[in-house]
Image: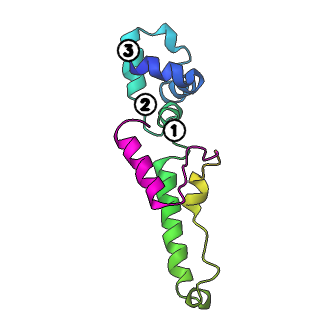
Amino acid sequence: MIMASMVATDETALICDFAETYHILDYKGLPLRLAAALASGLRDGSRIKMAMSGATIGSDTALLAAAVDRLSLLVWSKTKDAEKNRNKPKSMLAMLLKDDRPKDDLEKFDTAEEFEAARKRIIQGGG
C-alpha cells in the first residue's frame, strides 16, 4: 500500500531515493515485499517522503532557520530600531516556507452575521 502510494506520488523521487540510500537502480527487479520494506524504511527527509507530506524543506533546515530567526530578533531587540519598532528582521523560516499559491479558498465576511451563517453551514455539513 505504501509502495503503491509512493509510486503514484513521484516514481522518479522513489528511484532516486533507492539509488541514494540502497544503491539500487531497479527497484522493480526486487521482490515486492523487500521493495516495500525498503521504501517504508527511507528516512523522513527522503525525496519521496517529503513529496508525499507536501514538505518543501527538511526538519533540520526548518530548525536552523528558526534558530537564525530567534538570534536575529535577539540582536535586533538591543538596537535603537527595536525601541522604535522599525527595521524588524524578516523571518528566514517564513521565507523558506512561503506558499505562493493563490488563496482562493479564503472566504471573507463583512458582518458577524455573515460569518455565523457560514459557520453554521459548515458545521451542519453544507460546506
Asked whether the beta carbons under mark 1 and mark 2 sit within 8 Å of each other, the answer is no
Question: In the image, residue 13 lies at what x, y percent?
Answer: 57, 27
Of the residues under marks 3 and 2, which one precedes in the sequence?
Answer: 3
Disc 3 residue crowd, few under 14, some 14–19, many 20+, Cα 10 Å = few
| Picture layout, residue 53 above or below residue 86 | above
Which is in the foreground here, disc 1 or disc 3? 1
Which is in the foreground here, disc 1 or disc 2? 1
Amino acid type, label 2: Leu
Question: In the image, residue 76 lies at what x, y percent?
Answer: 56, 81
The residue located at (52%, 53%) in the rendering is 61
Disc 1 to disc 3, how far (Cα)? 26 Å
| Picture layout, residue 61 above or below residue 32 | below
The residue located at (41%, 35%) in the rendering is 126
Judging by the rendered image, the residue that carries numbered circle 3 is 34
The quarter of the picture where residue 44 lies is top left
Asked whether the beta carbons under mark 1 and mark 3 sit within 8 Å of each other, the answer is no
Instruction: Return the residue nearer the eye: 102 or 54.
Output: 102
Asked whether the beta carbons under mark 3 and mark 2 sit within 8 Å of each other, the answer is no
Amino acid type, label 1: Gly
Disc 1 to disc 2, how far (Cα)? 16 Å
Question: In the image, residue 42 lies at what x, y percent?
Answer: 43, 31
Dot 2 falls on a residue whose secondary structure is loop
Judging by the rendered image, the residue that carries numbered circle 2 is 42
Disc 3 to disc 2, how far (Cα)? 13 Å
Amino acid type, label 3: Leu
**On the picture, is 119 further left or further right than 88?**
left
Judging by the rendered image, the residue that carries numbered circle 1 is 54
- In the image, which residues are magenta? 102-127
Of the residues under marks 1 and 2, which one precedes in the sequence?
Answer: 2
Instruction: Return the residue nearer the eye: 93 or 41.
Output: 93
Q: Is residue 122 magenta?
A: yes
Of the residues under marks 1 and 3, which one precedes in the sequence?
Answer: 3
